[in-house]
Image: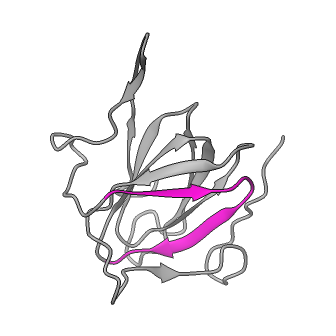
Amino acid sequence: MIHDVKTKHLRVIPDDRGRLMEMMRADDDLYEGFGQVYLSTTYPGVVKAWHYHKLQKDNFVCVKGMVKLVLADTREGSPTKGHIDEFVLGEHNPTLVQVPIGVYHGWKCIGAEEAYVINVPTKTYDYKEPDEYRLDPHQNGIIAYDWATKDR
């Protein structure tokens, strides 16, 4: 796994009224502050990638549908520079993934329905000076990654 990436398997508690799933708590080991909470949706087959942050960590949970979250470590001096991590997240694998500062990330909706991803970043989004550094998801000269679904 890429250096400094953290994961947390999320416990789903069902009862006769529905389900409860805690995503993040202030007493979690991976909790480092709260910037905001937002929902991002992705249509089937769509890729939302690549970008990284210099100031914040992201904490992603897919609460509806399924996504393949991919991380690429291009950080100078990182012991895992050049590594790629893939996580399949969603209703069938309730997991939180914390993306470290400086690690490129993105996802593809791999289910047949729109995916809903919740993010709890450690900093608030700055509309005037966004902390986002982007690359084309398919051809960028930095990350060689094939977003095609692997069916074998």
At a point 72% along the width and 52% down the height, the residue shown is: 44
Picture residue at 33% right of the left edge, 57% below the top: 37
Q: Is residue 146 above or below residue 13?
A: below
Residue in the picture at 69% in, 66% down = 145
Q: Which residues are magenta?
A: 37-54
The quarter of the rendered structure image containing the C terminus is: top right
Q: Which residue appears farthest toward the bottom when viewing the image?
A: 128
Left or right for 67, reference 20: right
x, y (%) of residue 15?
A: 41, 12
* Left or right of residue 132: residue 123: left
Q: Is residue 11 visible?
A: no
Q: Is residue 75 visible?
A: yes
Q: Residue 32 is drawn in which quadrant?
A: bottom left
Residue 54 vs residue 19, the one in the foreground = 19
Specify the farthest residue to the top. Answer: 16
Residue 16: give x, y in percent of width and height: 43, 10
Q: Foreground: 26 or 19?
A: 19
Q: Position of residue 146 (x, y in %)?
A: 74, 63
